Image (cartoon, rainbow, N blue to C red):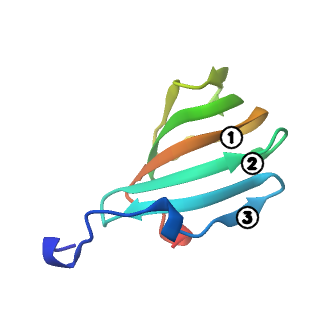
Amino acid sequence: MQAAALSFFSSSTSQRWESVGEGVRRQVLTHDDQLMLVKVAFERGGIGSRHRHFQTQLTYVESGVFTVSVGDEKRVVTAGDTFLIPSDVWHGVECIEAGMLLDVFSPPRAEFL
């Protein structure tokens, strides 16, 4: 994307939320052709079903408590923790205490747009 066509700033108040399952909703905050930032809100008990995708994913736990599985490894993560999901690795989350995740994808998830 050329710099002239790119908006360098985005406000979460102008981005819509999308329900993606019971107790889970997401908001695409910003993206270009290389990166995407997505906020995912979970209610207690919300599940991000086990899946995989070709994008590399980095996640920051903004708030809440989650059980996260990446490949064969499973951990409980809390606010301030991060985790990395390499391309094509199975992963999923279960929300123990309501919270928010910030996901970064490279390249962007076209199906989110």
Q: Which residue is mark 1?
A: 92
Helix, strand or loop at label 3? It is strand
Q: CA distance from mark 3 to mark 2?
A: 14 Å
Circle 1: residue type: Gly
Q: Which residue is mark 2?
A: 49
In this rendering, is residue 32 above or below 64? Answer: below
Circle 3: residue type: Ser
Q: Which mark is residue 19?
A: 3
Q: Nearer the viewer, residue 25 or 48?
A: 25
Q: Position of residue 17 (x, y in %)?
A: 63, 65
Q: Position of residue 54 (x, y in %)?
A: 47, 54
Rate crowding at label 2 as few (under 14), some (14 to 19) or many (20 or more) other CA atoms within 10 Å.
Answer: few
Q: Position of residue 99 (x, y in %)?
A: 68, 38
Q: CA distance from mark 2 to mark 1?
A: 5 Å
Farthest residue, direction front? 13
Which quarter of the figure has residue 91?
top right
Circle 2: residue type: Ser
Which comes before the other along the chain, label 3 or label 2?
A: 3
Task: Indicate the quadrant containing the N terminus: top left, top right, bottom left or bottom right.
Answer: bottom left
In the image, taking residue 10 as reference, residue 13 lies left or right, namely right
